[in-house]
Every structure is written in structure tokens, then in C-alpha cells.
Image: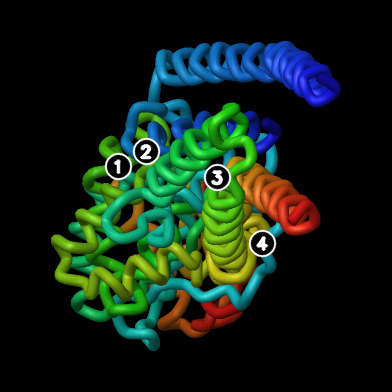
């Protein structure tokens, strides 16, 4: 449930950044750091799409999976737990790479990107704990 | 019999569990709905706000490197001229487009003066640091002055009033100038020459430049978008001084004032 809630927040954060990247929003609200520097840099695009759009895709899939996982039918499905852990694990790695770029290559921090990275990390940790509880039960 | 009772008990328990699970999910759905509403509302709000609001750039934490102007003309020309300018300042744009072509043709090309441009980005101009950055990255490929001209000629297309994201415009200029776009972009994104720009800015304040553009012509300092004639008059007086080889400041009837300048090496301080 927490994972699904976090994923929904992530959907909005990444939608916000995607809309900015596509030019629907003039400027980013950025109390801390330099969001524009980060989001207009060459690393803000990955395989031809804005990184934020990849993030949006990730969160939508994560939301769908975690929403299903709390339904009766899949509540005891170990496969679902594995899928979530793998997905969020991959998200954590990717976010880690982006945060590395912000800190050491672009030399600027984007608070929204850091927020997203934290959300993904927490989602991963919870999914991992969930997976462990399955292991403990069997 | 006993087994039946046991089964019935299990069924009831399962029902209770089911019920409690169903009720415990209600706050979850409520939370999702609230987050969904708030999120959609917030996105609708930011998307409906007017675009092109300029952003603030914090430049106070940039470490200064060595001040280094951009040279045009022979470095050992008899009169040394320095300009402190802000790419986004309208007066600088006016000077660059009106007086500077004549200055280049009649004073720089014949070797009368050497001309050094120092960045003096002012805090009220939101895109000027990016412009200085774009020009410095063009300088890396030997095209500072070409980028300088593009920036001033098309100032209204990329300034803080026109856009909050000037990079795409600068990219167009870089392309039009035939720069290696990847190299330029990496340089721009990494803000490679920020310390140099910062140092140039510090030199401007150290030299007492109170407005943009400010010119140091020989031992005179003058501010504002001066005309070619005014500029030429100051160069002539500096030329006389240079020829008589006395660096003493002379009284002058114009708005410029005398400043102590080390002979022939005003740049690179």
C-alpha cells in the first residue's frame, strides 16, 4: 500500500518534470538547487526521450503492480513481490546514476529529481522487506 | 460433527479476515484519491501559470578563476581598450550593433587599438550568465567574437523577457557559426568557464565599473553606450599620451574620468 501511494506521488513528480521538458510549464518551482540547469542538460534525455518521461513510465508500471499486489487475488503472490522488488531495484540503480551525474558531472542539484530518487529508494526498501517476509513465511 | 464445526469456524474466521481486510483498505483508497486530486490540481495550476517567468541564478558561490578578457586586434597596439559588458544589457547591445562595427573597421583592423571584452554579468539580467557561458564555450573553438555578435544582434530573442530557457537559442547560434555542437554543448552544460566569467566580473567591480558597458580607453574610463565619435575622441587623446610616452592623466571636458592603468597591459589582471 505504501509502495502504491509512493508510486502515485512519483507519477505526479515525473509528470511535472515531463511537462516542463515538453514546454508546457514555463519554469520549475525550485526552492533548493538549480532544477533548470539539471533539466536542460544533455543528461536530461535518455534514448531520445526525456529522463522524466522514463520516470513517469516507471512509476505508472510500479503503481499498477503495487496496486494489484494489494488486491485479494495477488496478495499472496510471491511473483508479484519479486517483480516489484526487481522493478524498484532497477529504478534505484537508475536514480543513483542520475544523482551521481547531478553531483559530480553537472554540479547542480534538482530537488524534484532528488525527491524522486528518495521515493524510489523507499519503494525499493519496502518491496525488499515485503519479499523477505515471503521468504520467512515459506 | 466436530470436523463440521471446525470447518464452519474456519469459514467464519476467513470471512472476518476478509471483512477486516476490506475495511482496512478504505484509508488506502482514500489516500490514493486525495493524492490524486491534489496532484492533478497542482499540475493543472502550474500548467496554467504564465510561461517565461525568469529564474534567479545564484552566482555568489562560484569560485573565481583568473580574469581573462577576449582579445580583438593586435595585443601590442598603441592604445589598449577594455570593455566591461553584460550580454543582456540593452545599452551594451546598442553599442555593439551601432558603434562597434565602425570601431572594428577603423580602429582595430588598422592596429590603432587592441580591444578586450570582459564579462560583467549584472544580477538583474537573468540569462546573462548563460550568455557569457555560451560565448566562452564558443571562444574554446576560436569563435568568441562571432558568438558575441550573434548574442548582441539577437538579444531580444534570448533575454530574460523572451525566455527562461535560452539554451536552445544559443544552440542555434552555435550551429549557425559552424561550431562543433557536441563540444560546445558539453562545455555549456558543464559551465566550464564559470570561474573565468566570475573573475572577469570581479575585475570589473575592482576597476570601479559602475554600469554596463564601461570602457577603459588608455587612462580614461567612460560608461554608457557611447557613439563612435566619442569613442574615437578618447582613443585620439590616449594615442597622444601613448606617443608622448607619458601616462599622466590629462584633464578632460567629457564625461569620462581618468583611471590609473598600467601601461599597455590592462588585461589579464
The picture places residue A62, in percent across and down from the top left corner, at 51, 41
Q: CA distance from mark 1 to mark 3?
A: 24 Å
Circle 3 packing at 10 Å, graded few (<14), some (14-19), many (20+), is: many
* Labels 4 and 3 positioned on one and the same chain: no
In three-dimensional space, the C-alpha distance between marks 2 and 1, rounded to whole angstroms, equals 6 Å
Give the residue at mark 4: B62
Question: Residue at 41% across / 64% down in the picture?
Answer: B188
Where is residue B239? Give x, y as percent. Answer: 39, 73
Q: Are marks 1 and 4 in contact (CB under 8 Å)?
A: no
**Is residue B43 shown to the viewer in this render?**
yes
Q: How is the image coloured?
A: rainbow
Between disc 1 and disc 3, the foreground one is 3
Say yes or no: labels 1 and 3 on the same chain: no
Say which residue label 1 marks.
B155
Q: Which residue is mark 3?
A: A35
- Give residue B159's mark: 2
Q: Say which mark, if any, is on residue B254.
A: none
Question: Visible in this render: residue B113?
Answer: no
Q: Quadrant of residue B11?
A: top right
Q: Give the crowd class for mark 4: few <14, some 14-19, many >=20 residues within 10 Å.
A: few
Marks 3, 2 in one chain: no
SS for callout 3: helix
Q: Say which chain tag 1 marks.
A: B
Amino acid at each position: 500500500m505504501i509502495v502504491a501511494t509512493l508510486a502515485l506521488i512519483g507519477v505526479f513528480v515525473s509528470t511535472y518534470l515531463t511537462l516542463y521538458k515538453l514546454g508546457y510549464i514555463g519554469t520549475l518551482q525550485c526552492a533548493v538547487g538549480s532544477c533548470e540547469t539539471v533539466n536542460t542538460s544533455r543528461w536530461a534525455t535518455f534514448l531520445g526521450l526525456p529522463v522524466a518521461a522514463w520516470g513517469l513510465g516507471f512509476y505508472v508500471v510500479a503503481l499498477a503492480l503495487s496496486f494489484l499486489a494489494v488486491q485479494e487475488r495477488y496478495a499472496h503472490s510471491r511473483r508479484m513481490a519479486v517483480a516489484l522488488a526487481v522493478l524498484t531495484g532497477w529504478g534505484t540503480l537508475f536514480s543513483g546514476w542520475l544523482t551521481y551525474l547531478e553531483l559530480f558531472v553537472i554540479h547542480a542539484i534538482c530537488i524534484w529529481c532528488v525527491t524522486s530518487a528518495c521515493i524510489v529508494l523507499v519503494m525499493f526498501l519496502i518491496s525488499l522487506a515485503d519479499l523477505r517476509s515471503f521468504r520467512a513465511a515459506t | 460433527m466436530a470436523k463440521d464445526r471446525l470447518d464452519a469456524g474456519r469459514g467464519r474466521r476467513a470471512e472476518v479476515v476478509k471483512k477486516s481486510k476490506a475495511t482496512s483498505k478504505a484509508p488506502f483508497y482514500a489516500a490514493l484519491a486525495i493524492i490524486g486530486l491534489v496532484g492533478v490540481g497542482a499540475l493543472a495550476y502550474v500548467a496554467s501559470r504564465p510561461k517565461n517567468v525568469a529564474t534567479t541564478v545564484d552566482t555568489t558561490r562560484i569560485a573565481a578563476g583568473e580574469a581573462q578578457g577576449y582579445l580583438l586586434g593586435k595585443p601590442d597596439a598603441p592604445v589598449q581598450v577594455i570593455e566591461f559588458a553584460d550580454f543582456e544589457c540593452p545599452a551594451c547591445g546598442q553599442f555593439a550593433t551601432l558603434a562597434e562595427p565602425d570601431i572594428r573597421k577603423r580602429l582595430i583592423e588598422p592596429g590603432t587599438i587592441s580591444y578586450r571584452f570582459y564579462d560583467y554579468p549584472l544580477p538583474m539580467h537573468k540569462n546573462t550568465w548563460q550568455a557569457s557561458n555560451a560565448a566562452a564555450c564558443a571562444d574554446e573553438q576560436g569563435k568568441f567574437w562571432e558568438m558575441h555578435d550573434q548574442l548582441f544582434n539577437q538579444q531580444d530573442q534570448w533575454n530574460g523577457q523572451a525566455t527562461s530557457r535560452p539554451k536552445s537559442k544559443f544552440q542555434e547560434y552555435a550551429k549557425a557559426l559552424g561550431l562543433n555542437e557536441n563540444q560546445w554543448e558539453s562545455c555549456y552544460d558543464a559551465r566550464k568557464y564559470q570561474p573565468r566569467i566570475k573573475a572577469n566580473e570581479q575585475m570589473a567591480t575592482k576597476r570601479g565599473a559602475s554600469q554596463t558597458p564601461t570602457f577603459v580607453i588608455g587612462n580614461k574610463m567612460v560608461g554608457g553606450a557611447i557613439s563612435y565619435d566619442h569613442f574615437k575622441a578618447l582613443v585620439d587623446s590616449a594615442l597622444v599620451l601613448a606617443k608622448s610616452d607619458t601616462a599622466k592623466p590629462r584633464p578632460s571636458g567629457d564625461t569620462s574620468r581618468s583611471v590609473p592603468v598600467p601601461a599597455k597591459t590592462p588585461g589579464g589582471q
